[in-house]
Amino acid sequence: MSKLDVSIVKVEPLRAISIWGFGPNPEDQAWAKLEAWAKPKGLLNDPEAHPIYGFNNPNPSPGSPNYGYELWMVVGDDVEPEGDLRVIDFEGGLYAVTRCEVLKEDFEVIGATWRELVAWREDSEYKAACHQWLEKSVLLDLWGSEIPPELAWAMDLYLPIAK
């Protein structure tokens, strides 16, 4: 039996700005682009209204240090594409969700937690679904003054499921 704390969540349809990075550290590239675009607009000030999701696109390939990472920031109808940033409409879907706490320099925990979540689904009443796998950024200030010093960041992993 899995030791993961898993919640079942329905993600409603959303409209988002899509930001992409590619290379050996595409997450850093995508986050830098996101910050440069969203910070002047004040969109980073309200994470409840503008949650940020991410996922590999494309996935890493054996033998290559390069892969892609795409970020989606939920935005309103007033936001238009700019430069290489595009607007996407996502239909949403049903997800199994668990928290992944990433300790400093322990990035392997992300893949390990994804594998545990897939194993949880395989032992559950749910089936695999085809909508997008997602990683949702979690603000560290959720822990208040109790943030463990070894914690680098946290994210919620969203595994697509169906009944």
Image: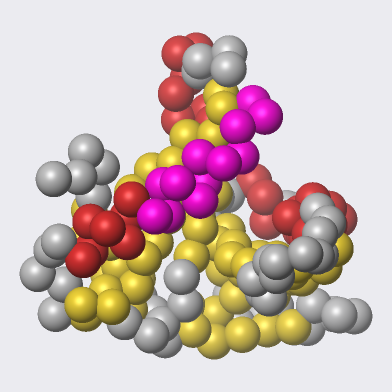
Residue 106 painted magenta: yes
Residue 34 painted magenta: no
The residue lying toward the viewer, choosing from 120 and 89, is: 120
Specify the quadrant that holds the N terminus.
top left
In the image, is residue 75 above or below residue 47?
Answer: below
Residue 90 in the image: state x and y as whole percent.
49, 84
Report the residue at 23% width, 64% height from top: 121
Q: How is the image coloured?
A: secondary structure
Q: Which residues are magenta?
A: 104-115
- Classify residue 121 as left or right of residue 33: left
The residue lying toward the viewer, choosing from 144 and 114, is: 114
The residue lying toward the viewer, choosing from 77 and 81, is: 81
Specify the quadrant that holds the C terminus.
bottom left
In the image, is residue 16 above or below residue 53?
Answer: below
Q: Main secondary structure of the magenta part?
A: helix
Residue 129 in the image: state x and y as whole percent.
31, 82
Report the residue at 30% width, 67% height from top: 95
Residue farthest right in this picture: 83
Q: Is residue 57 visible in this depiction of the protein?
A: yes
Residue 56 in the image: state x and y as whole percent.
63, 67
- Classify residue 126 as left or right of residue 72: left
Q: Quadrant of residue 85?
A: bottom right
- Classify residue 128 as left or right of residue 74: left
Residue 125 in the image: state x and y as whole percent.
9, 69
